[in-house]
Image: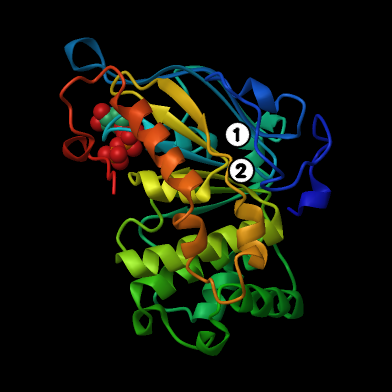
Amino acid sequence: MSATQQPDPTGPDTGPHAGTTTTTDTTGAGTTTAAVAVRAEHVTRTFGRGDRQVVALQDVDLTVGAGEFVSLIGPSGCGKSTLLRLVADLDTPTSGTVEVFGRSAREARLARDYGIAFQQAGLLPWRTVRANVELPLQLAGTGRAGRRARAEELLALVGLTDFADHHPDQLSGGMQQRVAIARALADEPSLLLMDEPFGALDEMTREHLQAQLLRICAETRAAVVFVTHSIPEAVFLSDRVVVMSPRPGQIREIVDVGLDRHAAALGGSGPHDDTGDDLRNDAAFFAAVARVRDALHAGQPGAAPAARGVDVR
Ligand SMILES: Nc1ncnc2c1ncn2[C@@H]1O[C@H](COP(=O)(O)OP(=O)(O)OP(=O)(O)O)[C@@H](O)[C@H]1O
């Protein structure tokens, strides 16, 4: 579904990265005047029973604005993937509600309001790159010519035009991940749900794809909920970084990053800066990394984040 087909949101579209958000509390209340992509209210998810019960999420409130990039970060097992799966309607909350563009997560899934990209690219090996990208459109009943045109557009966007007729096993891991992103964008979703999509990639490829993702989001104006273990990745990409606490998973703090990624993504850092190096070398970037690191450390005396599954590089 295209952004123009969205049900009437609750306010004006502020566009992606349109300046810094004003949110300072853990509910995302500062976004209440803007259009809302995701609203989770009092969300609790428990697994198992009795002695074996695990409280994966406890009373989580989170609002993600339309066009906003929000990362979830926290120790392993704190419920990041669980929260993303609830938004994607791959799971249901034990209590509380999740809304996507004002409707239930299930309705949003049926309306294909969002695209998904996870750590494994999950491409169909027997289909060409082009046919993989066309898949969501095929499922949606889009005609052959329309599918072809959209796939060409998306492959150009992710820089894979020359590989349209290749099969996934002929591509590197980073290229496969770009195909997965193109596929996630095929239906013009207004929301992308991404669970460590670059987690298995080498650092250079990862930084390159991060910069590409920023550019794509600036162009498509999609909101993104992005799970990562990397503080620099979260800071580089996000308008806001949601820092979660160990089980039971709760939101400890939301950090407003406040970098001008929009300008950088659209070439403000120069036409040759396809890695986002200018942004990564900015003093404001380091300051934001320190703020997220402090939030992760808070309440965990002596606990080294790296040992807890969080990359603080
Ligand atoms: N289907 C399930 N059945 C039972 N327990 C589950 C299930 N899914 C998640 N959990 C538990 O919920 C907790 C949160 O898991 P989740 O995968 O959301 O954490 P995470 O923050 O994404 O972790 P990681 O960073 O390691 O990927 C964990 O204790 C996990 O064991």
**Residue 116 position within the rendered picture, expressed as x and y whole percent measured from the top left:** 52, 52
Residue sitting at 47 percent across and 48 percent down? 283
Q: Nearer the viewer, residue 236 or 280?
A: 280
Which residue lies under the disc numbered 2? 109
Residue sitting at 16 percent across and 37 percent down? 307
Q: Amino acid at mark 2?
A: Arg
Q: Is mark 2 within 8 Å of ligand 1?
A: no
- Please say if 85 is above or below 214: above
Residue sitting at 84 percent across and 37 percent down? 12
- Distance from label 1 to label 2 (Cα)? 6 Å
**Residue 146 position within the rendered picture, expressed as x and y whole percent measured from the top left:** 75, 75
User: Which mark is drawn over residue 105?
Assistant: 1
**Residue 184 position within the rendered picture, expressed as x and y whole percent measured from the top left:** 56, 59
Dot 1 and dot 2 residues touching (CB under 8 Å): yes
Regarding residue 104, the answer to whether it shows in the image is yes
Regarding residue 123, the answer to whether it shows in the image is no
- Please say if 209 is above or below 256: below
